[in-house]
Amino acid sequence: MKNPTDSKEILNYVSGFQTKAQGIRRFEGNPYVKGDNIAEHLSRLMRLLICIAPQLKAEFPGEQDLVEKVLVTLHVHDDDEVIDGFDIPTALKVHNEKDGKEIVDFEQSVFALGDVVRDYLVPLFRSFRKKDTLVAKIAKALDNIAGNQLVIEQEIGLVNPDQARFAIEYAEKVRGTSKVVDLLIDAQIQQIVEYRKIALNNLKDLPANAEKLLQIDVLNHVLDKAKINLPLEQL
């Protein structure tokens, strides 16, 4: 930082983005998930990353500053949504459709922070959009895993075979970048399958059609995205 003006811009930037991120809800229209905003999602991602940081360093010993770069990437990866003021639910989103515009908008959002900060942040944000580096691929994998966690924690959505199948495919699509991350994917898919087995043996408080839905093999189920956000009673 060259002068107090730079410091003031940084404080204003952090305050503005944090406040907006806290007000942008995720999972809009999903009847199975309550709560979560972008700020909470970022906090979850940071905790997920620090829990596997030692293993990532061991897996990629030649990658300098890997964890730092993944952390920074995760912190800014949803800034396009903060800038826009809303989040399109994952199941409805057309991914990579507006990458060019999002990169330009992000560059403009950090312009006042100065060349040094801008040159540090913009390449990581751009790379996340392009998925062209190890850092970006790990960040995307963790983003998908963390995105699934609320559905799994709140459980009821997993009774819907299409919601459960979507979560499985969302995790599977980011497999293959890291052995450490792949173990998380394996564990998450196992959580989904195990919950459905447990729920099938304890149908109390579930809708009348839950038994039929839980008998579907979600590992081989063909996803119908149109049914992801339908209440159980309509399936």
Image: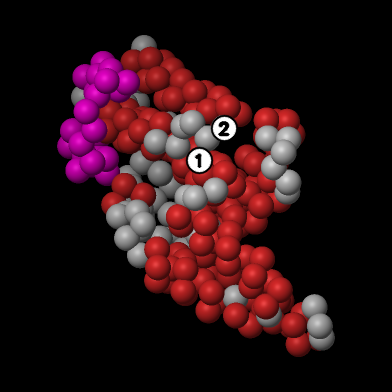
Sequence-earlier tag: 2 or 1: 1
What kind of residue is marked 2? Ser
Which of these two is toward me, 101 or 45? Answer: 101
Residue, far front: 62
Q: Position of residue 152 (x, y in %)?
A: 45, 33
Q: Position of residue 227 (x, y in %)?
A: 21, 39
**Callout 2 environment at 10 Å: few (<14), some (14 to 19), or many (20+)?**
some
Which picture quadrant has residue 60? top right
Q: Is residue 224 shown in magenta?
A: yes
What kind of residue is marked 1? Ala
**CB within 8 Å, label 2 to label 1:** yes
Q: Is residue 99 visible from the viewing direction of this image?
A: yes
Q: Label 2 belongs to which residue?
A: 178
For the C terminus, the image quarter is top left
Residue interval drawn in magenta: 210-235
Q: Is residue 54 above or below residue 138?
A: above
Q: Label 1 belongs to which residue?
A: 141
Q: Is residue 140 above or below residue 15?
A: above
**Callout 1 environment at 10 Å: few (<14), some (14 to 19), or many (20+)?**
many
